[in-house]
Image: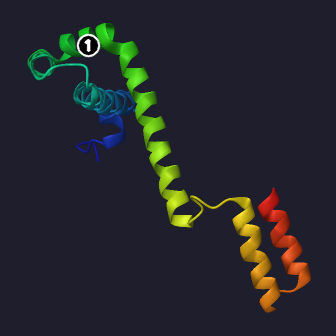
Amino acid sequence: MAGRDYLAYDYPVLGAFWTVMWVFLWVAWIFLIFRVVVDLFRDDRLSGWVKAAWLLCVLVLPYLGVLIYLIARGRGMGEREVRQAESQKAAFDKYIRETAGTTGHSELAELERLSEIRARGDITDEEFQRAKQKILR
């Protein structure tokens, strides 16, 4: 057994920690580059030539290019991200309203429809009162 080396002694815990840390930093770096590129193409105020110059700077000199981009346009990145999120939320809300069929219906129209259903005898007075309370809330 004198000639055997055990893996635990060849690769200590601190070495595993450093490996995990470097992998994490590498993934974070790739994520940051993608965020910069996505933000660059999301901005409508920049012309195509300026976007091409920024992209070239980020791809040719990645560390310096990303650092300069974050310093020069970092605040705008956050503002554009908020606008994008608000736009997506508004589109989603509009889609939900259209899908649910509630656009253009007022409370009065809903109450009239509910009253007609009760008059036909499809629902009881108790069900009518519960549905009416839901509409009026």
Res 122 seen here:
no
Quadrant of the image for the C terminus? Answer: bottom right
- Display coloring: rainbow
Residue 62 position within the rendered picture, expressed as x and y whole percent measured from the top left: 17, 18
Q: Residues within 10 Å of mark 1 (few under 14, many from 20)?
A: some
Res 21 seen here:
yes
In the displayed structure, 12 sits above or below 79; it is below
Amino acid type at circle 1 is Tyr
Front residue of 129 and 47: 129
Residue 22 position within the rendered picture, expressed as x and y whole percent measured from the top left: 31, 27
Side of 101 where 17 appears, left or right: left
Q: Secondary structure at mark 1?
A: helix
Side of 52 where 126 appears, left or right: right
Q: Which residue is mark 1?
A: 69
> Which residue sits at x=25%, y=20%?
45
Quarter-of-image position of residue 129: bottom right
Quarter-of-image position of residue 80: top left
Residue 51 position within the rendered picture, expressed as x and y whole percent measured from the top left: 15, 21
In the displayed structure, 30 sits above or below 2; it is above
> Which residue sits at x=27%, y=11%?
67
> Which residue sits at x=27%, y=30%?
42
In the displayed structure, 30 sits above or below 103; it is above
Front residue of 27 and 126: 126
Count of numbered tags? 1
Side of 110 where 34 appears, left or right: left
